[in-house]
Amino acid sequence: MPERPELLQIGGVSDRMAERLAASFTVTRLPDAYEGFLAERGADFVAIATTHGVPDDVQAGLPNLKVISSFGVGYDSINADAAAEHGVIVAHTPDVLNDEVADTAIMLWLAVSKELVPAERWARSGTWEAQGNYPLARSVRGRTVGILGLGRIGQTIAKMAGMFDAKVIYHARTKKDVPYRYCPDLVEMAREADVLIVITPGGPETRHLVNAEVLRALGPEGILINIARGSVVDEAALVEALGDGTLGAAGLDVFEEEPKIPEALKSMDNVVLVPHIGSATKETRAAMGDLVCDNLDRWLVDGRVIAPVPECRHLNE
Ligand code: NAP
Ligand code: 8YV
């Protein structure tokens, strides 16, 4: 292996990441139009650092690729099965963002329930002075919180929900060793929950898990919080349910066609919309960037990474 092996960078990185990557690798940024580039240079690269997934044709166009280090815990924009099949280890950034993403989920729940955005508008626009007090909102205290996906972040959200005297219930494919009640049926859980917080991975397996039936079960007083991936919720069904009162309200960090958000959602008062900021603080993004680089530096030492995705764990032993 050369002293500073060739690394392909996909997407932008912070100055701190750029410095660290350049200390260990010879870094080339993937150009916007990359067809000719892949044919000419594809065989040079043994590593990828990405903040933007890996297009299938790029992955397939790097015959000597050995490791992909991805910024983010979700890796639905990387074909991890194909990577594993070709002996390529995919690494990601779990755990370092649990608290941040859970904080954002709870923030959305509070903002929706206590009507932060319209209340703030009421204060800012002078309506308070002209018309008097803002109408009463709903308390978050003592609610039943249904969590869809009780993994690292889901369990952090569950703990935080306890601070609001919540009764936590959850749905996943398998029952966990946790002090919360497992609901094997998502629709049943939605019927029981006041708030449904979605925090599963994205990808084909979870596509539209939250469909019209689940939204109907959550009901006209129910709140949906999606901090997972836009694909997990049927957005067209969501727009309809919010519009006709089948569902009460929603707080959304992620969307099916990011950065596009349906115009109908933008015009609704019972919805809080934020632009995929779940982990977006300087501190947490720095920790994620460090883990991207730590994964690669460890790979340089012994061919293993600190945080392989499950599909690649066998390659990391
Ligand atoms: P994790 O520890 O792997 O947890 C995932 C959970 O989802 C597990 O409880 C898993 O349990 C469940 N799950 C997986 N497939 C499922 C299915 N088909 N049906 C029902 N439950 C399913 O992952 P994490 O670290 O908590 O992260 C979760 C996801 O959050 C990431 O993959 C990413 O998409 C999203 N995320 C979003 C942001 C943001 O900025 N908005 C930030 C970070 C992460 P079972 O295996 O038992 O089903
Ligand atoms: C990031 C995320 O915004 O970790 C994830 O899965 O969705 C977020 O933390 C994203 O990965 C940055 O591109």
Image (cartoon, rainbow, N blue to C red):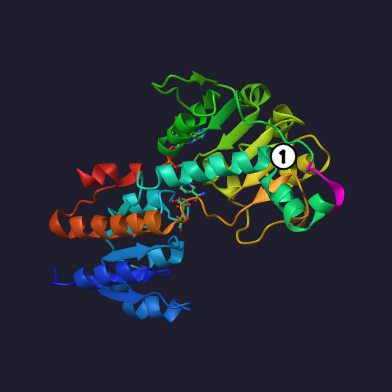
Q: Is residue 201 visible?
A: no
Q: Is mark 1 within 8 Å of ligand 1?
A: no
Identity of the residue drawn at 20% across and 71% down:
23
Q: Which residues are magenta?
A: 130-134
Q: How many marks?
A: 1
Residue 42 screen position, x and y as percent: 33, 73
The N terminus - image quarter: bottom left
**Looking at the image, is 226 positioned above or below residue 14?**
above
Please say whether residue 15 is one of the residues in the magenta stretch.
Answer: no
**Looking at the image, is 164 positioned above or below residue 38?**
above
Q: Please state which of residues 246 and 250 is positioned toward the viewer in this rendering.
A: 250
Residue 133 screen position, x and y as percent: 79, 43
**Looking at the image, is 282 positioned above or below residue 138?**
below
Mark 1, residues whose alpha carbon is within 10 Å: few (<14), some, or many (≥20)?
many
Identity of the residue drawn at 31% across and 68% down:
16
Q: Please state which of residues 146 and 69 is positioned toward the viewer in this rendering.
A: 146
Identity of the residue drawn at 35% across and 55% down:
288
**Looking at the image, is 186 positioned above or below residue 71?**
above
